[in-house]
Amino acid sequence: MAFKKKLEEKILDVDAAMQGSLSFKDPVNLRINGKFEGNLDTRGNLIIGPAAVINADIIGDNIIVGGRVKGKITAKERLTLLPQAIVEGHIYPVRLNVAEGAVLEGQCSMLHDFLNPEQLAKYLEVELHSIMEWANSGKVPGDKEGNDWKFERKAIDSWVASGKIGK
């Protein structure tokens, strides 16, 4: 008889003033209710509470904003702006939900499902020549159409998560 191990839900609820960089390799449910300044790199769900004041560049999977955020937000799955949200800066969501009453002062560029080599270099924060070396040697998942490479975002995210980047 096989038993399924119940996965523990990782929840981190922060109601404090913090400054610096927070980075999570494993998915967590992070809720920020206080002040944060710096950089956030999350996996899983990030909830910015209605009383939160954030001055940061944020990268995450599923991001819900209920408070005030100033900075760049990259949401790899979904960005939701609740009615009381105030966002100043550029947002880069795959999918976007904006509730009536939310304020966005800045630019929105929707992330596409496919990236060209230049977009992939920016997405992974590596040099373009590294992307081309990896593509031509088959180290990065991608498709060549004529002379042009295209990379599916989901395949790239899986590749990065597997730890194969740069190997």
Image (cartoon, rainbow, N blue to C red):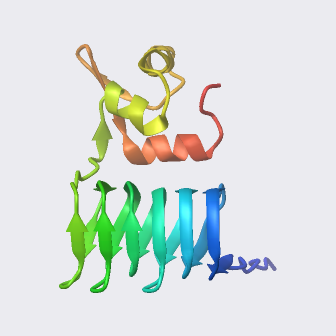
Say above or below: 38 vs 133.
below
Residue 111 drawn at (x, y percent):
29, 50
The answer, for residue 12, to whether it is visible in the render is: yes
Q: Is residue 85 left or right of residue 38?
A: left
View extreme (left): residue = 100
State the residue at coordinates (43%, 69%): 63
State the residue at coordinates (30%, 85%): 84
The answer, for residue 43, to whether it is visible in the render is: no
Say above or below: 118 vs 107.
above
Q: Is residue 34 left or right of residue 63?
A: right
Say above or below: 145 vs 77.
above
Q: Quadrant of residue 24?
A: bottom right
Q: Quadrant of the C terminus?
A: top right
Residue 21 drawn at (x, y percent):
62, 54
View extreme (right): residue = 1
Say above or below: 106 vs 28.
above
Residue 18 drawn at (x, y percent):
64, 68
Residue 124 drawn at (x, y percent):
48, 36
82 or 157, which lies in front?
Answer: 82
Q: How many marks?
A: 0
Q: Quadrant of residue 13?
A: bottom right
Q: Is residue 119 left or right of residue 28?
A: left
State the residue at coordinates (63%, 34%): 164
